[in-house]
Image (tube, rainbow, N blue to C red):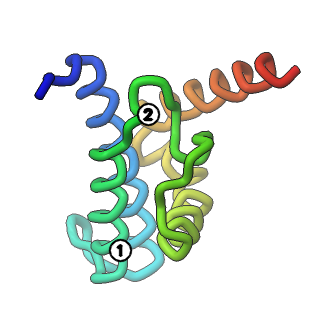
Amino acid sequence: MQQPPKNLDKKRADEKLLVSEMIALYCRKQHDTPKGALCPECQQLHDYALARIEKCPFMETKTFCSACKVHCYKPEMREKIRAVMRWAGPRMLPVHPVLSIRHVAVTLKSKREAKKANG
């Protein structure tokens, strides 16, 4: 089996870090869990999200799951991760400024590219 290129490993690791931090922030503030811990429901979502990222066949070309044409999340988990992203996204800047700015830059770039492709 071939090893993925290093930049693909980094991209996968960055996405896992972002998702992990967003779920952790959400759980800490919404479920009153201590820093460094997740409630069972958020732990399940976290493990599921990381497994999806690990198995993503489109990692080389995709930006974020929300921009993907194929949705590999089960509907229930997709709704849960959307709720987490909607809540945690705007609150990430003071907590993780570098991750937040990088995420916004990639999101804007993917929206521009999608507009060009469709327009």
Which residue is at the front of the view, 104 or 69? 69
Q: Residue at x 26, y 75 (%)?
A: 34
* Side of 2 relative to 83 (left or right): left
Q: Position of residue 48 (x, y in %)?
A: 33, 64
**Mark-to-mark CA distance, 1 and 2:** 25 Å
The mark tally for this picture is: 2
Residue 31 in percent (x, y) is at 41, 82
> Is 51 left, or right, of 67 in this rendering?
left
Query: Label 2, on which residue?
Result: 58
As drawn, the residue found furthest toward the front would be 1
Residue 67 place in picture, x, y as percent:
62, 40
Give the residue at x 55% y 71%.
75
Q: What residue is shown at x 40% (from left), y 24% (from top)?
A: 60
User: Label 2 sits on what residue type?
Assistant: Phe
Figure check: 41 above or below 68: below
Please tell me whether mark 2 sits on a helix, a strand or a loop: loop
- Please tell me which residue is depicted at 27% across the width and 64% down the height of the picture: 47
Mark 1 = which residue?
42
For label 1, the SS is helix
Q: Amino acid at mark 1?
A: Cys
Please name which of the two marks, 1 or 2, marks the residue nearer to the observer. Answer: 2
Q: Quadrant of the C terminus?
A: top right
Q: Which residue occupies the foreground of this view, 4 or 66?
A: 4
Q: Looking at the picture, how far across and down is residue 78, in whole percent?
A: 53, 65
54 relative position to 63: left or right: left
Choose top left, top right, bottom left or bottom right for residue 107: top right
Q: Quadrant of residue 57?
A: top left
Q: Residues within 10 Å of mark 1 (few under 14, many from 20)?
A: many
- Residues packed near mark 2 inside 10 Å, few (<14), some (14 to 19) or many (20 plus): some
Viewer-proximal residue among 34 and 119: 119
